[in-house]
Image (cartoon, rainbow, N blue to C red):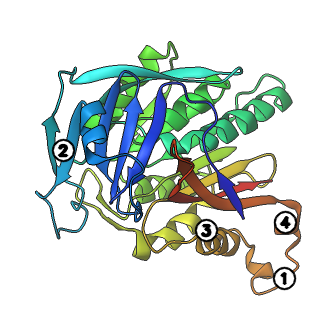
């Protein structure tokens, strides 16, 4: 099992963590946000935290409501803009993201996802170089504000970006334009419905990225619950991912989902029917599987685990 933390950030820093909170720098602004996994004591004092921070988020408005647990209010401590840009960059690629304060404590990026972006760029670039001029097709499901889409597009892919919320798709479009990229296909639809239709049409993708929420709703009221629908989704996704020269990235934030559980879900969903229950499935043995946790390391060397991932390459 892998433990990965970002290495390419200049515009993000986890300064300190603890007491169920995290002190973070996003570009020129410092924020205090709730973090239920920060069970330890902070290394800096409360006075030091509030002295640095521009704003602080407190929960409350959606307490006890499924899917709305993170809703609440921002409390300004210093003057700051409502929206501001940051850059994620490596030697090979970079992109820009517009950030903003939302009512669900989020700001438009999950910085711990950077190792997944690096993987997506690298694997997509490999596919581009092997394709003799044919762009690989990459599908980003539950795509939020599109950092993974930008990584795939920067590598030269034909990218389809799907989210059920029109506002975040519009936000993604702004990020694409800020990054001086173009021609991403935008889809506002229920992810499971879309994947099932793509399977019926026989459409195949060389890369599929999934970051499903614990709860959600499609644009037409479709209900998503991770525990009930994840395995079905993976099974349908297995029908539209190319069986050779392809990759899958699955990321999960929901508490209670371990990396081992995620790995087992992917292994089981991608087994061929004739191989179910057997330990020697030839296709899976040829594949490369990685699984682990994404963590942020604060300025005092405390590791904050935030999500689990599985990467399948074949």
Residue at (52% x, 16% y) in the render? 181
Residue 298 vertical position relative to residue 236 in the rendered view, above or below: above
Query: Horizontal placement of 49 versus 128: left or right?
Result: left
Q: Are marks 2 and 1 in contact (CB under 8 Å)?
A: no
Q: Which mark is residue 259?
A: 3
- Can residue 53 be seen in the rendering of this structure? no
Q: Tell me where residue 272 appears, x and y as whole percent.
A: 75, 73
Q: Which mark is residue 103?
A: 2
The secondary element bearing badge 4 is classed as helix
Q: Residue 68 is drawn in which quadrant?
A: bottom left
Dot placed on the residue nearer the N-terminal end, 1 or 3: 3
Q: Is residue 115 above or below residue 149?
A: below
Foreground: disc 2 or disc 1:
2
Residue at x 33%, y 59% (from the top left corner)? 19
Q: Residue furthest top?
A: 180
Which residue shows up at 53% across the image and 21% down it? 95
Q: Nearer the viewer, mark 1 or mark 3?
A: 3
Residue 263 horizontal/vertical position (percent): 66, 69
Instruction: State the image coordinates of residue 144 (x, y, percent, origin top left).
Output: 39, 42
Mark toward the viewer: 4 or 3? 3
Label 3 to label 2: alpha-carbon separation: 29 Å
Position of residue 44 relative to residue 1, above or below, is: above
Judging by the rendered image, the residue that carries numbered circle 4 is: 283
Look at the numbered disc 3 and give the secondary structure of its residue.
Answer: helix
176 left or right, relative to 247: left
Q: Which mark is residue 279?
A: 1
Give the spatial CA distance, label 4 vs label 2.
45 Å
Q: Residues within 10 Å of mark 4 (few under 14, many from 20)?
A: some
Q: Which callout, 4 or 1, points to the residue nearer the camera?
A: 1
Mark whose residue sits in front, 4 or 2: 2
Label 3 environment density (alpha carbons within 10 Å; few <14, some 14–19, many ≥20): many
- First in sequence: mark 3 vs mark 2: 2
């Amino acid at each position: 099992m892998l433990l990965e933390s970002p290495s390419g950030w200049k515009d993000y820093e986890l300064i300190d963590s603890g007491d169920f909170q995290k002190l973070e720098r996003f570009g020129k602004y410092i924020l205090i946000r709730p973090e239920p996994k920060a069970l330890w004591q902070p290394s800096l004092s409360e006075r030091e935290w509030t002295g640095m921070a521009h704003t602080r988020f407190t929960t409350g408005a959606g307490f006890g409501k499924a899917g709305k647990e993170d809703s609440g209010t921002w409390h300004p401590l210093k003057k700051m803009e409502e929206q501001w840009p940051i850059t994620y960059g490596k030697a090979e690629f970079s992109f820009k993201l517009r950030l903003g304060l939302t009512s669900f404590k989020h700001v438009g990026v999950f910085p711990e996802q950077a190792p997944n972006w690096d993987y997506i760029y690298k694997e997509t670039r490999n596919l581009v170089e092997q394709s003799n001029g044919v762009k690989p097709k990459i599908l980003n499901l539950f795509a939020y504000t599109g950092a993974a889409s930008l990584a795939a597009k920067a590598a030269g892919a034909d990218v389809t970006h799907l989210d059920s919320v029109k506002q975040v798709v519009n936000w993604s479009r702004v990020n694409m334009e800020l990054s001086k990229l173009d021609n991403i296909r935008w889809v506002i639809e229920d992810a499971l419905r879309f994947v099932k239709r793509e399977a019926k049409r026989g459409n195949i993708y060389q890369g599929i990225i999934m970051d499903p929420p614990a709860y959600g709703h499609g644009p037409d009221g479709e209900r998503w619950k991770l525990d009930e629908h994840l395995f079905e989704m993976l099974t349908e996704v297995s029908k539209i991912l190319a069986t050779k020269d392809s990759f899958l990235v699955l990321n999960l934030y929901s508490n209670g989902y371990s990396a081992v559980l995620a790995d087992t879900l992917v292994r089981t969903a991608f087994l061929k029917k004739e191989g179910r229950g057997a330990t020697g499935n030839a296709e899976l043995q040829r594949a490369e599987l990685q699984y682990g946790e994404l963590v942020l390391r604060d300025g005092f060397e405390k590791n904050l685990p935030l999500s689990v991932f599985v990467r399948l390459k074949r």
